[in-house]
Amino acid sequence: MTKIAPSILSADFARMGEEVKSAKAAGADWLHIDVMDGHFCPNLTMGPDMVKALKKSSDLFLDVHLMVTNPENFFESFAKAGADLLVFHIETDPDPTDKIKMIRDLGCRAGLSLNPDKPVSAVLPYLEQVDLVLLMSVFPGYSGQSFIPESLERAAEIRSFIDEHKLDCALEIDGGVSRTTAPDIIKAGVDIVVMGSAFFGDDDRTGIVRYIKSL
C-alpha cells in the first residue's frame, strides 16, 4: 500500500507539535523533512535541531531530504538527531557510492534524489545500493508548486528498472502531489508520496490519507 509522507515545510511552524500529532492521527506513515542550504536551491529551511525535536515528539519514520551542496557535511549531525532515512541528490556527486556507505555506517537508511532536469539514467546504476530513490516532480525550493507532467514517464521508467532487476528500492515522489495528480502518480508505480500543502492545507487530512491509500 502507498505510504504518505507529509512534508513539514508546509506545516504551521508555530504549531509544529500539533501538526505532527495531526499527521499521525490522520494516518500518515512518515514525516518528510526538507533541508535546504540556500545554495543548492534558493531557500533556507530547517536543521538537525528540528529533526531532534520531531524524534522526541513522534514515533513516525523521519525521512530527511538533504537539498544541500555538500551533503556529506551533514550526515552525522542529522543521523545523531534521529533521522531514519537520509536522502541526498545525485547532482551533488555523479558517483555517490562513498556517500551512500557513509550514511549506512551511521546506521541510517540511504536514498538518492534527482531533479526534474536530471536524466533518470544518472541514478539507475546506484539503485541497488540504496533503500529509496526520490524523484522530484517540481524544482526544489518552495512548496505549493505545480506537478510537472513529464514526471509520470520518469517515474514509470524508474519503476520498470526496479522491477526488472528485482531491487529492494522504494520509489518516492515529491512535488505537486494532490487529490488530482495522485491517481496517475500511483499508477506509475510510486511507493511513497510526499504531500505538502495538499496535506497540511486540507481540513480533512484523514480523508486525503484514506483517498491516497485507496488508490
Image: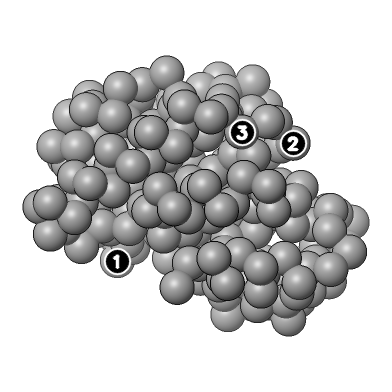
Residue found 72% across the figure and 65% down from its top: 208
Q: Dot 2, how many residues are within 10 Å of its Cα: few (below 14), some (14-19), or many (20+)?
A: some
Q: Earlier in the sequence, mark 1 or mark 2?
A: 1
Q: Are marks 2 and 3 in contact (CB under 8 Å)?
A: no
Q: Amino acid at mark 3?
A: Phe
**In the depicted structure, whether residue 57 falls above or below residue 68:** below
Residue found 48% across the figure and 55% down from its top: 186
Q: Which residue is mark 1?
A: 107
Q: Position of residue 135 (x, y in %)?
A: 42, 39
Q: Which residue is mark 3?
A: 147
Toward the viewer: 48 or 10?
A: 10
Q: Earlier in the sequence, mark 3 or mark 1?
A: 1
**In the depicted structure, whether residue 50 falls above or below residue 115:** below
Q: Is residue 132 left or right of residue 38?
A: left
**Alpha carbons under labels 2 and 3: distance apart:** 9 Å
Q: Amino acid at mark 2?
A: Gly
Q: Amino acid at mark 1?
A: Gly
Q: Which mark is residue 144?
A: 2
Residue 49 in view here: no
**Alpha carbons under labels 1 and 2: distance apart:** 33 Å
